[in-house]
Image (cartoon, rainbow, N blue to C red):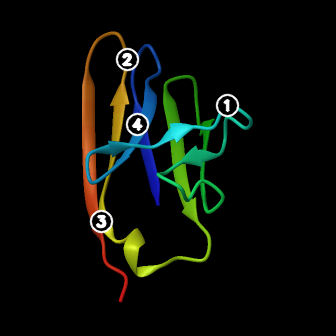
Amino acid sequence: MKCSATGNPIPGIQWFVDSQELLPSPNDPLQARFWQMSDRYSIGSYRQSTTEIVSHINITQVRIEDSGDYRCVAINLVSSVSHSARLNIY
C-alpha cells in the first residue's frame, strides 16, 4: 500500500493496523514490528519533492490474519491528516 502527503515542513508518516501502530525495528529502521510478524512487514519512504513524502508498506507471504483497517497518518508541526483503507484477504 502507498501513502503520500505534502506539507511545509515536510510531514512524517506513521502506519497503523486496526489502531495498532507499526513501529520500526531497532535493528533495521525499514522493518516494521507488527506483533510477532516483523519478518513479513516492511515500511519504506522517500521524498518525492521538497514538500512531498511517499511511504509504502509491503507484506510478504500475506495471510488471512493480515486483513484489517490500514491507516497512514501524515504529521508535521502545523497539522496532521490521515487516510485509511480496509484490506480483506480470503
Q: Is residue 48 left or right of residue 90?
A: right
Q: What label does residue 5 carry, if any?
A: 4
- Foreground residue among 37 and 74: 37
Q: Is residue 30 left or right of residue 53?
A: right
Quadrant including the C terminus: bottom left
Q: CA distance from mark 2 to mark 4?
A: 10 Å
Q: Residue 47: x and y, percent?
A: 61, 33
Q: What label does residue 34 carry, if any?
A: none
Q: What label does residue 68 carry, if any?
A: 3
Q: Nearer the viewer, mark 2 or mark 1?
A: 1
Where disc 1 sits, the SS reads loop
Q: CA distance from mark 3 to mark 4?
A: 22 Å
Q: CA distance from mark 3 to mark 1?
A: 25 Å
- What's the residue type where badge 3 is placed? Gly
For image coordinates 66% across by 58% down, the residue present is 39
Q: Nearer the viewer, mark 4 or mark 1?
A: 1
- Foreground residue among 66 and 81: 66
Where disc 3 sits, the SS reads strand
Q: Indicate which disc, 4 or 1, sits on the residue closer to the N terminus.
A: 4
- Verify CB contact (< 8 Å) between mark 2 and mark 4: no
Q: Indicate which disc, 2 or 1, sits on the residue closer to the N terminus.
A: 1
Q: What label does residue 76 carry, if any?
A: 2
Q: Residue 29: x and y, percent?
A: 67, 34
Q: CA distance from mark 3 to mark 2?
A: 26 Å
